[in-house]
Image: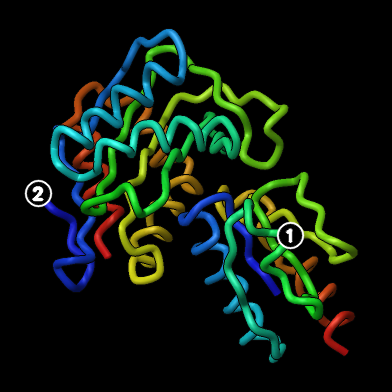
Amino acid sequence: MIACGSGVATSTVMASRVKSLLDKHNLKAEIIQCSMNEASTCSPADTALIVTSLGKLNVKDIPVVVAIPYITGIGAEAVDEQIVSILKERLK
Amino acid sequence: MHIAENAPENQFALSEELILVKQSVSNKVELLSKMADLLYRHGHVKDSYKEALLSREEVFPTGLNTQVSGVAIPHADSAHVNHSAIAMATLHQPVDFQAMDNPNNTVPVEIVIMLAIKEPKSQLVMLQNIMRILQQNDILVSIKAADSAAEVMEILSQHLSA
């Protein structure tokens, strides 16, 4: 699982929220933080999900969730649900 | 005045000298340059910070639509930062930035929070507090309406203590 922000601030905040989600739902996954420029190369083959601030990100066949709501607060719970349901599916 | 976050090296500098209110500028480059120059003059960032920030904003824009107004959170890599700091500006008239989640979309921005971040992982609480400001309409409204740096400073002090 990768939290890709376009810098250092957004990805740090996103990674923290994702970590809480993992703990809360008892999901076992490693969180890697990358910059947008490194995105296609820094995700290992078994990456379950990419959480990002940029809508255009496309890496192989890995699902991408845009987590801007984690920054603005608008629609954050919906993003939580999206992430949890994708992970439950992918981490089986 | 410094807003502390545990260890001294994790403090984010924030003071009235780093806050500009009701700015009139032609475009975002003018505003971002002005704010970056402020941070540089106070020793918080290296001379490479401004260029890095402007370039980054072009490729990975930081405009966000909140429920109150457009906000931008420009920042550059820690390599260009000497000491963590926050510079802020409110605009007399909105200035266009591009949206973080879709660079093709324009966001009319009225509040800019420029971040110089030295140690993102150990400054998570401060970053979360800053982001939380973006989520609270009443804080954004009062920042927008503030007539002086002192007033903005007062609002921020209440909400950014870690």
Amino acid under disc 2: Met
In the displayed structure image, the side of residue B150 where residue B80 appears, left or right: right
Q: Point out residue A41 in the picture as x, y percentages from the top left corner.
A: 71, 64
Instruction: Provide residue B93's location: percent of width, then percent of height.
Output: 44, 12
For the point 24% across and 43% down, which residue is it? B45
Does residue B83 appear in the picture of this structure? yes
The residue positioned 27% from the left and 22% from the top of the image is B21
Labelled disc at residue A40: 1
- Return the x and y of residue B64 as percentages of the image width and height: 57, 37
Query: x, y percentage for residue B136?
Result: 47, 47
In this view of the protein, which residue sits in the foreground, B4 or A5?
A5
Measuring 80% from the left and 66% from the top, which residue is drawn there?
Answer: A82
Q: Chain of mark 2?
A: B
Cα separation between marks 1 and 2? 42 Å
Identify which residue is drawn at 49% across, 17% down: B95
Question: Mark 1, chain letter?
Answer: A
Is residue B21 shown left or right of residue A82? left
Height in image: B16 above or below A5?
above
Q: Report helix, strand or loop for mark 1.
A: helix
Q: Quadrant of the C terminus of chain A?
A: bottom right
Q: Which amino acid, by three-letter code, is at mark 1?
A: Ser
